[in-house]
Image: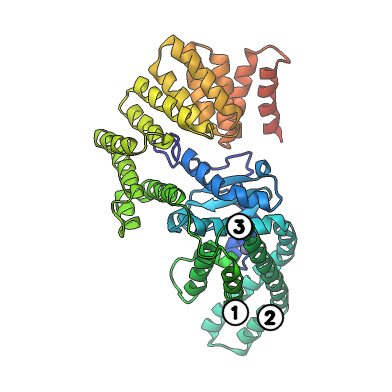
Amino acid sequence: MVAFQMTGLFRPIANFVRGAIVAGAASALCLAQTAIAAAQSSSVPIVRDAEIEALVTDYATPIIKTAGLSRNAIRIVLVNNNSFNAFVDGRRIFINTGALLQAQTPNEIIGVLAHETGHLAGGHEFKLREQLAAAKTLAVVTSLLGIGAVVGGAAGGASGLSKAGMGVAMGGPEAAMRNLLNYQRSEEMAADRSAITYLANTGQSAKGMLTTFERFSNALALTGTSVDPYRISHPMPRERIANLEVLAHASPYYDKPDSPALQQRHDMMRGKIAAYTGGGASVLQTFRKDPRNIGARYGDAIATYLNGSSQSALSKIDVLIKEQPKNPYFQEIRGEILLKQNKASDAAKAFQKANALDPRKSSLIRMSYGRALMLSGTPDNLKASIKEIKAGIASDREYPSGYGYLAQAYAQTGDMVRSDLASAEQKYYSGKIQDAQIFAIRAQRGLKNGTPEWIQAQDIINAKRK
Ligand SMILES: [Zn+2]
């Protein structure tokens, strides 16, 4: 399924797009030096999964629309991280799998997405970046001086000198920090207000947003435990929560619950994430109050499969398919399990069904279908395989595994030139530019000068030089 992708699915993809998936400033609008460094340099591990992408897109779409942003211009990116976080960066909304797992209802995630969309619509992250750039140096200096003063204080028994050092640390930079904090506070309030408007416009409750933010507000009392990044980037002072409470309660939709169908999809997503990130134990833990929930049983089936008991997993999935014969993702995981059993033809049938049932026609399912066709090996299937994989790539150009499948399929037909070209793309989108170039040069030797494929190879060779 490329459910969380790959055979060991849930594989994080570093440098997913030309190094473009780099955490944006808004994610690290905190004064901690480490977080700033992270925002500057680290890439974010990405998860691809047709089911979760579809669900989060369904959560976000009405909000994005009512915010006046173009739906197609905004991309949802799932981040493989157990902590709670969500942030915006240009035209993308990033959300951690940890946030999706922790949120008990769709409305909690929708509220967070509404708040983040408020930042996006307000152009906050761009302004923030400027503020952050100015403050960054100061933050580092403060932090270094602060540490130095503490060390000095410990060694010298809080001598006058180290006290002076502390004074420097808390002086000039402190004022700059305060400016930044004030600025951040006004942006948070603005995003809250926007979120409330978006939720009201779309007939949804703000209760979930309030629940989430209240949780973070209370969590501030805790120390020493791991800190969710969202809490750092979104300070939740009591006055902000109080404000939000009044606004949320004023909405006529405050007590409107999520639809049972949406709640069920949310539960199934949680079961899946729990299975992929923590196995059967995490599924049990997630659904300890409701062990017969369909999300629990779905998670159990996936955990069983990941555990290597594919026959048992297949029986469990088949029970679920009987309950929901039109669920494309049950068919998708069924295909994955069958592939694990080396039943490629049966797997292809399952993926084909998944693709037919999938209202979004996810490129991920389509590529899995193509891959299963390829693995089944007959000449006719190989031809169909290349067609399906290419169709998947056409709407998902930066997904490395798709090119990997294509390279394999071409190699099986004996077309090593196109296989090399596909391998070049795979390496390229995996961030391995040097390897990509080796494949591109080799492919180019077999291609006619100036053809689209020759140019495709040349682009990769040129990118290397840059
Ligand atoms: Zn915010």
Q: CA distance from mark 2 to mark 3?
A: 41 Å
**Residue on which disc 3 sits:** 114
User: Dot 1: few (<14), some (14–19), or many (≥20) neighbours within 10 Å?
Assistant: many
Does residue 435 appear in the picture of this structure? no
Q: Which mark is residue 149?
A: 1
Q: Which mark is residue 254?
A: none
User: Dot 3: few (<14), some (14–19), or many (≥20) neighbours within 10 Å?
Assistant: many
Does residue 319 appear in the picture of this structure? yes
* Quadrant holding the N terminus: top left
Label 3's element? helix
Q: Amino acid at mark 2?
A: Val
**Residue on which disc 2 sits:** 168
Q: Amino acid at mark 1?
A: Ala
Q: Are marks 2 and 1 in contact (CB under 8 Å)?
A: yes
Report x, y in % for residue 163: 62, 86
Mark closest to the chain's N terminus, 1 or 3: 3
Label 2's element? helix
Report x, y in % for residue 323: 33, 39
Residue found at x 30% / y 58%: 288
